[in-house]
Amino acid sequence: MQRATEKITALYCRLSVEDMKDDKNGGKGDVSNSIQNQKMILLQYAKEHRFPNPTFFVDDGYSGTNYDRPGFQAMLAEIEAGKVAVCCTKDLSRLGRNSSLTGLYINFTFPKYGVRYIAINDHFDTIDPNSTDNDVAGIKNWFNEFFAKDTSRKIRAVQKAKGERGVPLTTNVPFGYLKDPNDRTKWIVDEAAAQVVKRIFRLCMEGRGPMQIAKLLQEEKVLNPTAYKRRAGIKTPSPETSDPYHWNTNTVVHILERREYTGCTVNFKTYTNSIWDKKQRDTPLEKQAVFYGTHPAIIEQEVFDKVQEIRQQRHRRTKTGKSSLFSGMVYCADCGAKMRYCTTNYFEKRQDHFVCANYRSNTGSCSAHFIRAVVLEELVWMHMKAVIFYVTRYEKHFRDAMEHRLRLASEEKICASIKRLEQAQRRMGELDRLFIRIYEDNVAGKITDERFSMMSQSYEDEQTQLKAEIQTLQQDIEVQERQIENLEQFIQRVHKYADLQ
């Protein structure tokens, strides 16, 4: 019968995803790394050496590059409580592959709490500090870390190659899509979920914010993405909420901002600094890899772009919960300030109106300009009908007139932009030559270090400004060159909505 005060023997097992793959490929050495085999080796060793109370602590599928593992943390808690006499692992790499932290635990933490540590296959035992095997433990820990870095490097290279070919790197398909059973790298539309996605975008176009959309979907008992996927038998890493109809505001925002709904694949959206720092950081948009037309679109590009524009306006909600299509887009004709949307529950909708923000905040800076929401809607609708009528009946005249005006305007702007672009590029070259010259003068002693530092900083600041200007000019030129293409898209939309009610 074991005594209650007798300490335990901690038998620690760890297997990472990479180790699993290694086992499937035949393993390395004479003994497999599988959890079952580790347990057999550790238990046999404990019995042979008559270590008391053998207790397993297991981390299955966890990397050794950090120590934030549930099994190890549970063992560490027992060690710090003074309940562990001996800790055994199959080898040093099972304890971890971070040489600095592994050495810290072996040389400081374990001795501090009187724990004897044994790595069986590496013949390492802290009870004999003078052993030659103990002397090379640091080298073995370094090799274990090198193996982790090398494996990470290979995985990153494979992912980079796949991502640059346009293969989706995300393992979790966005809500609204399914993996094609004939080709798992392709996506097909999940019609039921796609209808919810379309509705979310439509509600945003109508002026509703993410919180309002989430509340409406919850009231209508629409399954949230996690609940929908779990009921459809689709794997998802997200934990299911107690209420399957609860929609989080962030979920709505994530859907509204996901470019994949326009039919493109977006890779390299996040990155990590190293194998030690697993925190996901957002990659700047210009460094993300975008591949267009890789799968069917659920949302048209123009609708997606308009939603992003609406989202950036960030107009405040009214106390009544009402919203307007034109919130954040109406400006006072006199002072140029935005006009606030005002509503009340005590009167019918015809009393909802927009009023000048300057007048509301400072009555002396502008007049009490206002317009009722229904009047504004009617005016915009009348203008839309007039444009649709004109374009559909006089398309050739409209096209010829607009193309002529666009070409004249574009040619003038493009010529001016190209001229300024050439000037900026020439100045960039001059600054490079000036920098080389002052560097040579500084080396030759013709100018002091202080003078060189001041001049070089001035040149670098000017170059930074020029680079930003060059980028803006190039974008302006591209926009002007796309004007004719935008005209064609506009005419197509007019025909699409010719019978709009």
Image (spheres, rainbow, N blue to C red):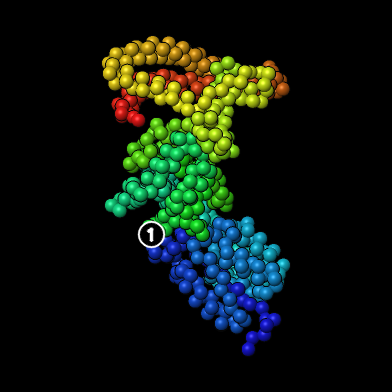
The type of residue carrying mark 1 is Gly
Pick the front one: 315 or 379: 379
Tell me residue 13's x, y (percent): 53, 69
Q: Quadrant of the N terminus?
A: bottom right
Q: 41 or 406, which is in the foreground?
A: 406
Residue at the outermost front position: 347
* Residue occupied by mark 1: 233
Within 10 Å of disc 1 (Cα), the crowding (few <14, some 14-19, many 20+) is few
Question: With respect to residue 163, does 377 lie above or below?
Answer: above
Q: Specify whether 15 is left or right of 112.
A: left
Q: Is residue 463 visible?
A: no
Look at the picture and state if 262 lies above or below 462: below
Residue shown at 39% from the left, 31% from the top: 302
Q: Secondary structure at mark 1?
A: loop
* Residue 441: % across, % down: 64, 18
User: From where the camera sits, is residue 500 visible?
Assistant: yes
Please tell me in which quadrant of the rendered image residue 29 appears. Answer: bottom left
Locate residue 283, reporting x and y percent.
51, 40
Determine whether, in the image, residue 148 is placed left or right of residue 448: left
Instruction: Report how many numbered discs are placed on residues in the image.
Output: 1
Q: Nearer the viewer, residue 245 or 52?
A: 245
Residue at 38 percent across and 62 percent down: it is: 25
- Answer with left or right where residue 163 lies relative to residue 466: left
User: Can you tell which quarter of the image residue 489 is in?
Assistant: top left
Residue drawn at (50%, 17%) of the image: 425
Using the rendered view, name the quadrant where residue 93 is placed.
bottom right
Q: Quadrant of the C terminus?
A: top left
Say above or below: 460 vs 220.
Answer: above
Q: Residue at x 40, y 46 (%)?
A: 196
Q: Position of residue 211 (x, y in %)?
A: 53, 43
Q: Residue furthest bottom?
A: 1
